[in-house]
Amino acid sequence: MKIETDHDRCIGAGQCVLTEPRIFDQDDDGLVRVLTERPRGADETAARTAVFICPAKALSLVEE
């Protein structure tokens, strides 16, 4: 699984960072930055949650 972002959709709400700060961060403009593109184990579950709750739907998962 790989996390992809759409910066054009990101509104900087930060829900991803609040959900899993080990996987997500925000840049200087408040837009999502992925720290771990291919999470494993428990981090994979947390990444799925963050993608689900993103209010702008700026995150997606690609199954590899």
Image (spheres, rainbow, N blue to C red):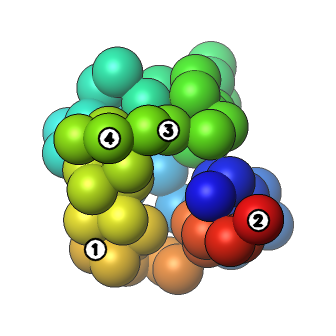
Q: How far, Cα to Cα, is label 4 from label 2?
A: 15 Å
**Residue at left offset 48%, top offset 50%:** 12
Q: Earlier in the sequence, mark 4 or mark 2?
A: 4
Mark 3, residue position: 39
Instruction: Find disc 2 in the rendering and name its residue.
Output: 64
Q: CA distance from mark 1 to mark 2?
A: 22 Å
> What residue sits right under mark 4 in the picture?
41
Identity of the amino acid at label 4?
Gly
| Residue at the spot of label 1 | 53
Q: Is residue 38 left or right of residue 25?
A: right
**Front residue of this view, candidates 27 and 34:** 34
**15 vs 52: above or below:** above
Q: CA distance from mark 1 to mark 3?
A: 17 Å
Compute the Cα span from label 4 to label 3.
7 Å
Expressed as whole percent of the image width and height from the top left, the position of residue 27 reads: 62, 24
Badge 2 element? loop
Q: Quadrant of residue 32?
A: top right
Q: Residues within 10 Å of mark 2 (few under 14, many from 20)?
A: few
Name the image quarter holding the C terminus.
Answer: bottom right
Residue type at tag 3: Pro
Residue at position x 23%, y 41% from top? 42
